[in-house]
């Protein structure tokens, strides 16, 4: 049986940073919250549509990365709703925003 330790890890998330390819800060300043608000209805199993306005989707969530407003997008969104995934990806490309591939890291309290 082959060992999977030598297998490269595939990114499970990508991050859209609010900075353009020429280094300008993307505007408006609340773009990340707006984008995540639009995507809040994609909450996965057990979430009711009428509760979507109360929290962000676990698949598209705002964050701050290197002091820059950003949005973390899970590859799981592609599986549950491909059109929504492509909408978010095209938003980044159309606005010339920086895309960073990332992989999921365990929560600090679950590491040994």
Image (tube, rainbow, N blue to C red):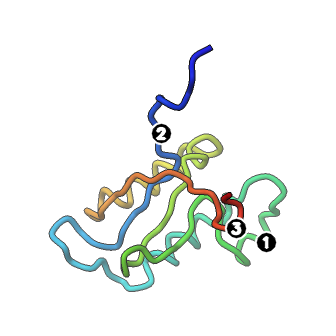
Give neighbour class at mark 1: few <14, some 14-19, many 20+ (Cα, 10 Å).
Answer: few
Q: Residue at x 56, y 27 (%)?
A: 4
Q: Nearer the viewer, mark 1 or mark 2?
A: 2
Which residue corresponds to mark 3?
109
Q: Residue furthest top?
A: 1
Reading the chain from its start, which is encountered first: label 3 or label 1?
1
Which residue corresponds to mark 1?
51
| Disc 2 element | loop
For residue 10, the mark is 2
- Whether the residues at callouts 3 and 1 have beta carbons within 8 Å, the answer is no
- Whether the residues at callouts 1 and 2 have beta carbons within 8 Å, the answer is no
| Disc 1 element | helix
> Which residue is nearer to you in this view: 62 or 43?
62
For residue 73, the mark is none
Please tell me whether residue 75 is drawn above or below residue 69 in the rendered image: above
Please tell me whether residue 71 is drawn above or below residue 64 in the rendered image: above
Give neighbour class at mark 2: few <14, some 14-19, many 20+ (Cα, 10 Å).
Answer: few
Reading the chain from its start, which is encountered first: label 1 or label 2?
2
Q: Nearer the viewer, mark 2 or mark 3?
A: 3
User: x, y (%) of residue 64?
Assistant: 45, 77
Q: CA distance from mark 1 to mark 2?
A: 32 Å
User: x, y (%) of residue 27?
Assistant: 32, 81
> Which residue is nearer to you in this view: 1 or 100?
1
Q: CA distance from mark 2 to mark 3?
A: 23 Å
User: x, y (%) of residue 66?
Assistant: 36, 76
Q: Residue furthest bottom?
A: 29
Give neighbour class at mark 3: few <14, some 14-19, many 20+ (Cα, 10 Å).
Answer: few
């Amino acid at each position: 049986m082959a060992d999977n330790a030598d297998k490269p890890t595939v990114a499970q998330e990508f991050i859209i940073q609010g900075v353009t390819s020429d280094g300008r800060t993307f505007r408006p300043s609340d773009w990340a919250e707006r984008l995540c608000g639009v995507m809040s209805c994609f909450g996965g199993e057990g979430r009711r549509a009428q509760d979507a306005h109360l929290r962000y989707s676990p698949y598209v969530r705002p964050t701050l990365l290197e002091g820059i407003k950003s949005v973390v997008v899970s590859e799981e969104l592609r599986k549950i709703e491909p059109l929504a995934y492509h909408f978010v990806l095209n938003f980044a490309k159309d606005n010339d925003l920086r895309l960073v591939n990332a992989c999921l890291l365990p929560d600090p309290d679950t590491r040994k």
